[in-house]
């Protein structure tokens, strides 16, 4: 393949890269669940917790289904058809993931209040609304996680899934520790640093997609190499393979791949790192959950 990643990521790259993605996205999902559970406990609506967990379970099942489709469906189609599908899927994944990352940056300040207000309305509506709220809130993060795994579609092994599960398990432990008051972390810095990491990963996925479309002839310049730095380091070493596997960087990118990679980083990092505006005023300081127990 003429992509920035010429071969499937190695096992260390698969474990580390997918694990870090699972940690970041899993912690986002864990915080969402923590907010919903804390609201119900404070409102003395523990009877509705089962509907939250049902929604969370459905979101996890959806995430696993999308993940497996990406991982094990990709290599059922071979040759140029596989390249075309991989290229298009990569570009779609980058578009969706970028919008989600930038949205989370702007919405994070008021997300907790929105979730509590949404749960208050869901309790008034009934059990189905509670399930739907939990499913959509967690499923959004799960879907984003699955899309980030496009870069591991060539692995054809269970290592990316294992790394993802390890990262999610660590995230769940951290979220539980935060809920219990035993763990304190600076979430703003955590999400800022990991957000930059995810943007760099998305840039690699974009370049991977461009390379795949060049291979099938849908984009020009498949033979126009930007440079060749194959002698700069041992790219077959463990650290070289980790760099290639996680960030889709190769010593011989095409000119178009390099331009797309640089342009994406310049635009998206600028949008992501620009100073955030003042958070919107909170309107749910004392949310009053309905006394009716319709979510029984």
Image (tube, rainbow, N blue to C red):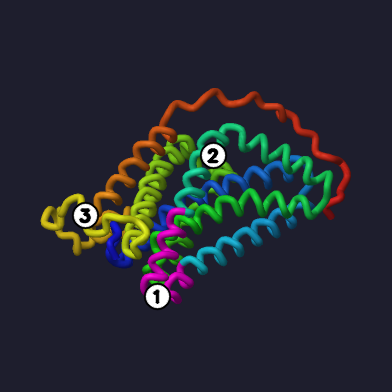
Determine if residue 22 is in view.
Answer: no
Q: Which-is-in-front pick, marks 3 and 1?
A: 3
Where residue 159 sits: x, y (%)? 40, 68
Q: Label 3, on which residue? A: 224
| Residue 16 or residue 203, whichever sits in front | 203
In the picture provided, is 43 more to the left or to the right than 220? Answer: right
Q: Are marks 2 and 1 in contact (CB under 8 Å)?
A: no
Q: Label 1, on which residue? A: 78
Please tell me which residue is depicted at 41% across the width and 38% down the height of the picture: 268
| Residue 253 or residue 287, whichever sits in front | 253
Q: Quadrant of the C terminus?
A: bottom right
Query: Dot 3, how many residues are within 10 Å of its Cα: few (below 14), some (14-19), or many (20+)?
Result: few
Helix, strand or loop status at disc 2: helix
Q: Which residues are magenta?
A: 71-91
Determine if residue 260 is in view.
Answer: yes
Helix, strand or loop status at disc 1: loop
Please tell me which residue is depicted at 68% across the width and 43% down the height of the picture: 38
Q: Earlier in the sequence, mark 3 or mark 2?
A: 2
Cα separation, mark 3 vs mark 2, equals: 36 Å
Q: Label 2, on which residue? A: 103
Q: Which-is-in-front pick, marks 3 and 2?
A: 3
């Amino acid at each position: 393949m003429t992509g920035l990643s010429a071969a499937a990521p190695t096992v260390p790259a698969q474990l580390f890269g997918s694990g870090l993605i699972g940690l970041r996205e899993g912690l986002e999902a864990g915080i969402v669940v923590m907010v919903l559970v804390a609201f119900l406990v404070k409102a003395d609506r523990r009877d509705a917790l089962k509907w939250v967990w049902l929604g969370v379970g459905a979101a996890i099942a959806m995430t696993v289904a999308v993940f497996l489709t990406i991982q094990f469906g990709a290599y059922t189609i071979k040759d140029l058809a596989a390249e075309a599908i991989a290229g298009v899927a990569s570009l779609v994944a980058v578009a969706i993931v970028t919008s989600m990352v930038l949205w989370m940056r702007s919405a994070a300040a008021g997300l907790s209040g929105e979730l509590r207000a949404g749960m208050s309305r869901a309790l008034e509506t009934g059990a189905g609304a509670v399930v739907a709220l939990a499913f959509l809130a967690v499923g959004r993060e799960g879907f984003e996680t699955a899309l980030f795994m496009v870069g591991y579609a060539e692995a054809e092994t269970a290592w990316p899934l294992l790394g993802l599960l390890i990262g999610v398990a660590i995230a769940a432990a951290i979220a539980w520790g935060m809920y219990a008051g035993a763990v304190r972390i600076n979430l703003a810095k955590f999400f800022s640093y990991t957000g930059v990491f995810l943007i760099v990963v998305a840039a690699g996925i974009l370049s991977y997609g461009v390379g795949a479309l060049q291979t099938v002839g849908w984009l020009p310049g498949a033979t126009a190499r930007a440079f060749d730095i194959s002698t700069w380091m041992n790219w077959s070493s463990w650290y070289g393979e980790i760099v290639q596997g996680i960030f889709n960087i190769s010593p011989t990118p095409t000119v178009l791949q390099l331009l797309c990679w640089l342009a994406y980083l310049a635009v998206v990092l600028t949008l992501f790192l620009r100073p955030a505006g003042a958070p919107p005023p909170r309107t749910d300081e004392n949310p009053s959950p309905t006394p009716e127990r319709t979510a029984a």
